[in-house]
Amino acid sequence: MKIVKISAKILAVILLTAVIGISMMSISPIYRFEGPSPFSGEKIYNPYADFDSTTGWKRACLHTHTKVDKGINECPYYPDVVYADYMSYGYDILGFSNHQALTPHPIDPELYIAIYEHGYNLFKFHINAFGVERVYKFDHLLPVLLSQKQFMIDRLAEDGDFVQFNHPNRTLTINRRVMEHLSGYRLIEGDSGFEERDHGAGTALNHWDEALSAGRYAHNNINDDNHNSKAHAAIARRCSWINTPTPYWEDVREQLLKGNFYTTRIPDFGNGDTAVKHAENMRLPKIMNIGMHGDTVFMKLSAPAATVKVISQNGITVDSVLNSDRIAYVMAAEDPYVRMTARYTDGTTVYTNAFARYSEGDSPYRELPHPVRWGMTILWNLMLLLITAAAIYGIVRIFIKHK
């Protein structure tokens, strides 16, 4: 019985210590959010207004992992190996977004992109912070509240150039309400996952459409989120094609913010045969021309797709063609935004960024206000303080009784 009592006390101390940690790592302001407000206005934003066919597209992956000496290791290979593996598949740009660690470029310092994946919470609410000089160490262990998510986006966006909302369809507590209220991120991984474990469900881009339908403008930037560059089924599965003159961050950043890129979801060609996979990755269909004439958006592909769709408010398909290498659509007055998707019979899927209505400024992107609700903020953090105090008192009582 004595052993049982001691074990129970040890377990109680562990649980109370966990409560203290979670409470202290849950501190956050509480905001007042604006509700959904679909895009509107006489102007239509064209993310490809500066598309230059002579510049062409540079293939990029801006979310992948490597082995690091400082940080959270989720990959068995160092950056030089991962870089070589990606270059063999025809990539031009690779961003090493290791968890809580900035990673120098292994070959050319001029190609370095200051990027890391922030977040070690239990819900996998992760954010890629671009253009930062340091790693922000604080995180909410259980980011249940919408305000906690917004606080982290705001804090990281202040530190660098902009942030990307990573893999919302693999993040716990993400739903339509969250997507309709969060703001401040410039990129989103609309289609994400490891390999093809979502069985094609990610191709719908539901969370991105929820955000766009609520007037939260962001560009879709899908990536491998690779944790093993030697795993055949994990590499070269999702990428972006950026219309940038150079692979250097100054140029890449400019085009990412404009939305002058498109993305591709790629099958695991070869089913384990690396030679086949390399060859097929060099023959991927591409966008040859894209843009807008008046109110008409258009796209021309290098090869006919089985289906080309135009998708608008709430993810509804408003136009489509079969077995075609092009599509043109006149945006109706009731279309707050449109985006295009082309799907091939082998599973290759091409996504464009969104053409959206706006009335002021240079684009539909808006810095939405979310003022602090001071009364609720004080109550929330006071509650956390009381929980922490109660847990500390419980630990003290256990040790006093034991003594």
Image: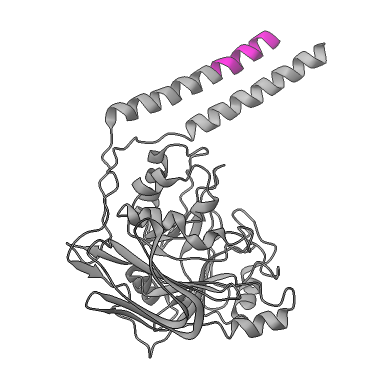
Residue 376 in the image: above or below residue 218: above
* Residue 128 seen in render: yes
Answer whether residue 363 is magenta in the image.
no
Answer whether residue 398 is magenta in the image.
yes
Left or right, 354 with reference to 267: left
Left or right, 230 with reference to 43: right
Which one is nearer the viewer's eye here, 54 or 111? Answer: 54
Measured as percent of width and height from the top left, residue 383 is found at 42, 23
Residue 191 in the image: above or below residue 100: below
State the scheme by which the image is colored: one colour
* Residue 403 seen in render: no
Tell me the quadrant of the picture where the C terminus can be found.
top right
Q: Quadrant of residue 219?
A: bottom left
Residue at 55%, 15% in the rendered image:
393
Marks counted in the figure total: 0
Residue 220 in the image: above or below residue 395: below
Q: Which residues are magenta?
A: 392-403
Residue at 55%, 20% in the rendered image:
391
Measured as percent of width and height from the top left, residue 375 is found at 29, 26
Residue at 39%, 23% in the rendered image:
382
